[in-house]
Image: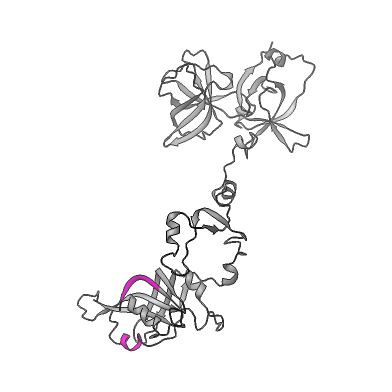
Amino acid sequence: MTEDSFIYMHTDSIVNATTKLSINITQALSLQAGNPDPAGRVTSIILGQQAFSVNGDETNTDLDRVLEQVERIRFTFQISTENDIIFDQQITDRSYYSAAIANGNPFFYFQFSPFLIEGYQNPPYASELYDYQSIVVSITPYLIDITVGNSEYNALIGNATNNRESKIRVESNRVEDGVFPTNWEAIMSGSALPATVQDSMYDDTGWTNARYNGSLITSRGNANISPAFTGTPFRGEIFSKATEDDYICTPTRKDQDILDLYHTGPTTPESQLPTFVTRSLGVTLQDSMTYGKDEKVILSGIPVTGSLTVGNIIKIVDQNLAGYELFLVERVKRVPPRVNLTCTRGYGQTEISPHGAGADVFLVDPYNLFRFEEESKLYIRLINTARILVQGNNTIVDTDRFGNVINSVTCSLS
């Protein structure tokens, strides 16, 4: 039958919907080749608001809140001499008919994707399919705790007790008409009252990052100290950035303050002590680079070798081979199989120089230097913008504001 006729049967008390399940089956052509028997086309069902029992409880059987949220319905028709008919359908649309509309027997009307039952008018279906059966119906999702589960005290849904007015959403009055809001003209004119919504911190960056998106901790946002690292101890003296080489290298200085220090550079046997070391990236400049006045430059086409990250330092030898220029990596944009680097030129007070196409690009080994803050050695501090005389290799290393080694000078033996 049509959907209108199916619903009318229940609103006009022809069929009492209370505690019952009704299925709309309409005659259709069989899908089986050579089968003259009609099939039954199932398109919708009606479920009464009350159940015989819910998990053995025959008192609290109101399914109103449950059926409002049901997404799938499953039950089985018992056929004595043939295979049972298993009904398992995803709900696509629903409507609620209150007691006033359904003559005191409220019910829910559900639609789903139609399916066929072959031979539904022939035995044994004809003798059993149309008889009333006591059926166990499974619906999902099933909220056991309806009272607390949908209240303001359920923290999983929200714990706001005072709602705020939305800046973009307005009230839609559907109390009198569930299909067309009675304040439609006010909505269209923009004069409808703001809707009250549950207050939420979901759009707060700190809240969402901590709970859902995660956060990336780098040395730049952590007092210039990496969130985790391993390193090697060494001993040395710390001097200010303006201290001359001759004074630091003087072996007869009376005032010496040799401290236990720490570096995070390579730990190979030949690099136990910090120094200024570079290694080739195996790539050359694609385009020549003039003096220019731009502090920022993009180096494109760098191969993804090792772990190039923000804070790394790049070295390119001058075109006239008289010196080199350092570049601080400010941004890494991966364009597989290569990366583009946005860099600051003339880093570490090196001279901004011209570089020809084909010039080799080197990566400065990332030595970060630290000192222990107290004798207990529980706290460390960056040795930034300083000069350090390293005991063991008689070398002076210079650090930038992030504690990176950007230069080294070897003291003469004389």
120 relative to 163 in the view: left or right: left
118 falls in the magenta region? yes
Question: What residue do we see at 56% from left, 55% from top?
Answer: 165
Query: In x, y percent, where is residue 99?
Result: 47, 79
Quarter of the rendering occupied by the C terminus: top right
Quarter residue 278 falls in: top right
- Rendered view: 226 above or below 321: below
- Rendered view: 369 above or below 111: above
Residue at far right of view: 254
**Along the viewing direction, whichever of 303 and 116 lies nearer the viewer:** 116
**Along the viewing direction, whichever of 343 and 243 lies nearer the viewer:** 343
Query: In x, y percent, where is residue 222?
Result: 63, 37
- The residue stretch that appears in magenta: 110-133
252 relative to 341 in the view: left or right: right
Residue at far left of view: 34
- Rendered view: 299 above or below 168: above
Quarter residue 27 falls in: bottom left
Query: In x, y percent, where is residue 130?
Result: 35, 86
**Along the viewing direction, whichever of 89 and 358 lies nearer the viewer:** 89
**Along the viewing direction, whichever of 39 and 26 lies nearer the viewer:** 26
> How many badges with numbers are in the image?
0
Question: What residue do we see at 47% from left, 12% from top?
Answer: 320
Quarter of the rendering occupied by the N terminus: bottom left
227 relative to 177 in the view: left or right: right
